[in-house]
């Protein structure tokens, strides 16, 4: 590597730069913790491969000599190992490394333009897998009637109602504070990338949250999370994931019936009822309309039937 950064960066281990990169992803890019964890795991696997491939612990300066062949060798290594990467995982690993290389360029003056020549596998986007309307309602009813402490049953029902009724991500629901114990008609949600959106709330969601707040044994205010764990701390998403696993087993639903499937169901059921695609995009906080259009594929049968029934030229 050449340039004013060379002397200062020559002794910095690539692992140290990786740590700074993950901090940047969290604080500046505002990516979710799980996304950052996956990116960091892919980048560390690459540095571990380089240590064997090059015969030394990689430094920032040492990365300047990498070639597209080195990156292709890494991808081939990952796809032929004991746990071979799928096309989707290989594409994610390449995206993680490109982000890391861009960071090295900005912060350390490392020019790695040649590595952009490496192309990952083509990945066709998978369709969302929502639960049916009947299954969504059954999930909410079962959550409300659990054999557990009444306040916990009310908490779980309220949270799942927000996922289905407002199209929230589980992380967004868990970020609400006690200030929303009296749920407003519109929730101000900070989603991915720090983007703010307004999510209308249904009367059923407002009533579910009211009932939970009434029964919750812990004080709820603007300084505390709305949804509390059994001992009063912030509710962990794993608790809700395990809850959904129990509910889908009891109701005979497939493994795809996860908390996120309720968000998918919100969009799909709105679309099938004639909801405007742009409005649904705003509700979900999608940056691109093409992301929202995936829900049209999920409900293609109903859309075609509605078209044939209602369109004047059908």
Image: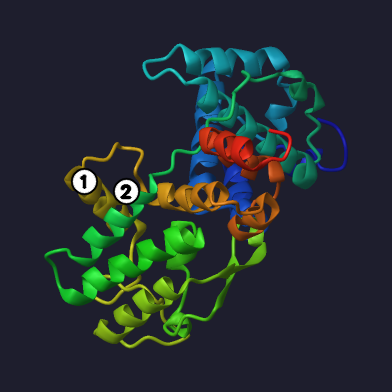
- Residue furthest out toward the left: 147
Q: Which residue is more in the foreground, 134 or 237? A: 134
**Picture coordinates of residue 132, whole percent (x, y):** 38, 45
Considering the image in quadrants, where does the N terminus appear?
Answer: top right
Is 29 placed above or below 84 here?
below
Residue at label 1?
Answer: 251
Q: Which residue is more in the foreground, 76 or 123? A: 123
Q: Is residue 169 left or right of residue 259?
A: right
**Picture coordinates of residue 171, whole percent (x, y):** 46, 60
> Regarding mark 2 in the picture, which secondary structure is present there?
helix
Q: Earlier in the sequence, mark 1 or mark 2?
A: 2
The circle on residue 135 is 2
Is 170 placed above or below 120 here?
below
**Picture coordinates of residue 91, whole percent (x, y):** 59, 26
Spatial CA span between label 1 and label 2: 8 Å
The residue drawn where x is 22% and y is 69% is: 153
Q: Is residue 8 left or right of residue 253?
A: right
> Regarding mark 1 in the picture, which secondary structure is present there?
helix
One can see residue 51 in this view: no
């Amino acid at each position: 590597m050449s340039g004013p950064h060379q002397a200062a960066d020559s002794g910095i281990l690539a692992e140290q730069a990786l740590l700074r990169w993950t901090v940047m992803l969290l604080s500046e890019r505002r990516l979710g913790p799980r996304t950052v964890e996956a990116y960091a795991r892919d980048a560390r696997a690459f540095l571990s491969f380089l240590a064997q491939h090059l015969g030394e612990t990689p430094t920032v300066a040492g990365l300047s000599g990498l070639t597209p062949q080195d990156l292709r060798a890494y991808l081939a290594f990952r796809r032929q190992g004991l746990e071979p990467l799928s096309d989707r995982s290989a594409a994610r690993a390449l995206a993680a490394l490109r982000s890391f290389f861009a960071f090295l360029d900005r912060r350390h003056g490392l020019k790695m333009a040649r590595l952009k020549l490496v192309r990952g596998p083509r990945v066709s986007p998978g369709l969302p897998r929502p639960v049916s309307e009947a299954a969504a309602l059954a999930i909410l009813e079962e959550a409300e009637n659990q054999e557990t402490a009444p306040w916990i049953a009310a908490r779980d029902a309220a949270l799942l109602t927000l996922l289905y009724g407002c199209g929230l991500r589980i992380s967004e629901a868990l970020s609400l504070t006690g200030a929303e114990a009296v749920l407003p008609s519109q929730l101000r949600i900070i989603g991915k990338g720090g983007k703010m959106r307004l999510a209308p709330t249904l009367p059923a969601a407002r009533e579910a949250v009211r009932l939970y707040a009434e029964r919750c044994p812990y004080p709820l205010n603007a300084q505390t999370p709305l949804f509390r764990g059994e001992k009063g701390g912030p509710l962990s998403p794993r608790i809700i994931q395990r809850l959904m696993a129990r509910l889908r087993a009891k109701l005979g639903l497939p493994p795809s019936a996860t908390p996120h499937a309720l968000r998918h169901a919100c969009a799909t059921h709105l679309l099938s009822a004639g909801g405007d695609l742009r409005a649904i995009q705003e509700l979900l906080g999608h940056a691109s309309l093409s992301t929202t259009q995936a829900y049209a594929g999920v409900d293609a049968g109903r859309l075609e039937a509605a078209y044939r029934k209602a369109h004047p030229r059908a």
